[in-house]
Amino acid sequence: MNAGVFQRLMAAAVTCVICCAAGAALADQNDERLNAMFNRLHELDDPREAQQIELAIWQVWSESGSDTADLLLARGVRAMNGQDFELAMDAFTALIALEPEFAEGWNKRATLHFVMGNFEASIADIDRTLELAPRHFGALSGLGQIYTLMDRPKDAIDAYRRGLAANPFMRGARATIQALQEKIGERDI
């Protein structure tokens, strides 16, 4: 990790915390809007409508309640998409230090660890994401992918099933579960 970049990000975060209103609220990952959206996902038959609800859920998950946290999140995502993994790691780590209860900060760093092949670190960040947002189907999908790559099919199946319990429209999960069950000779009961 580049210490200079990390220090600049942390300095900006601290400055904003000092200058901004102390009462800036972190988005609650148990926001009542989420309950309504998750309930609606379970009532739907239309995958297109489900996709719109999924996008709305992701939007709520991305609401930090802090301009600085939002800046760090956006900077990290841009850096990750541009394959500047060092800058992305610095941004996500600074975000987590600033807002340790913001699940999406942990999830984004888990994604970065996954992209970099750091599976154990990704699992640790996914575990924290799920402590904060147990219905985070994105994190559960990532966990399933990691366990599949680590040749841990039973753990992968469990992760995908948990994801489907939160979001029955989770793309590819059912087919992946079926393929993994065939691989290990397990039958769906």
Image (cartoon, helix red, strand yellow):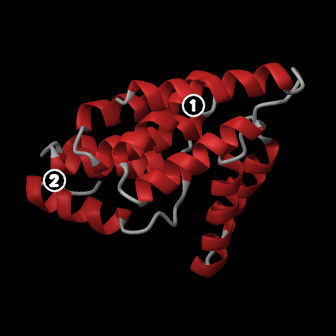
Q: Residue furthest front?
A: 4
Q: Earlier in the sequence, mark 1 or mark 2?
A: 1
- As helix, strand or loop, the secondary structure at mark 1 comes to helix
Identify the residue at image location x=30%, y=45%: 114
- Residue 30 seen: no
Q: Amino acid at mark 1?
A: Leu
Q: Is residue 14 above or below residue 1?
A: above
- As helix, strand or loop, the secondary structure at mark 2 comes to loop
Q: Amino acid at mark 2?
A: Glu
Q: Is residue 3 above or below residue 72?
A: above
Question: Which mark is drawn over residue 99?
Answer: none
Around disc 2, counting alpha carbons within 10 Å, would you say few (fewer than 14), some (14 to 19), or many (20 or more)? few
From the viewer's side, name the closer residue of 72 and 164: 72
Query: The N terminus is located in which quarter?
Result: top left
Q: Describe residue 121's horizontal placement relative to residue 66 as left or right.
A: left
From the viewer's side, name the closer residue of 90 and 143: 90
The residues tagged by marks 1 and 2 sit, at their Cα atoms, a distance apart of 49 Å
Q: What count of labels does the image hold? A: 2
Where is residue 188? Give x, y as percent: 27, 57
Q: Where is residue 176, by image quadrant?
A: bottom left
Report which residue position mark 2 lands on. 186
Report which residue position mark 1 lands on. 9
From the viewer's side, name the closer residue of 24 and 189: 24
Where is residue 22? Give x, y as percent: 87, 20
Q: Is residue 76 above or below residue 171?
A: above
Identify the residue at image location x=68%, y=66%: 53
Identify the residue at image location x=29%, y=54%: 189
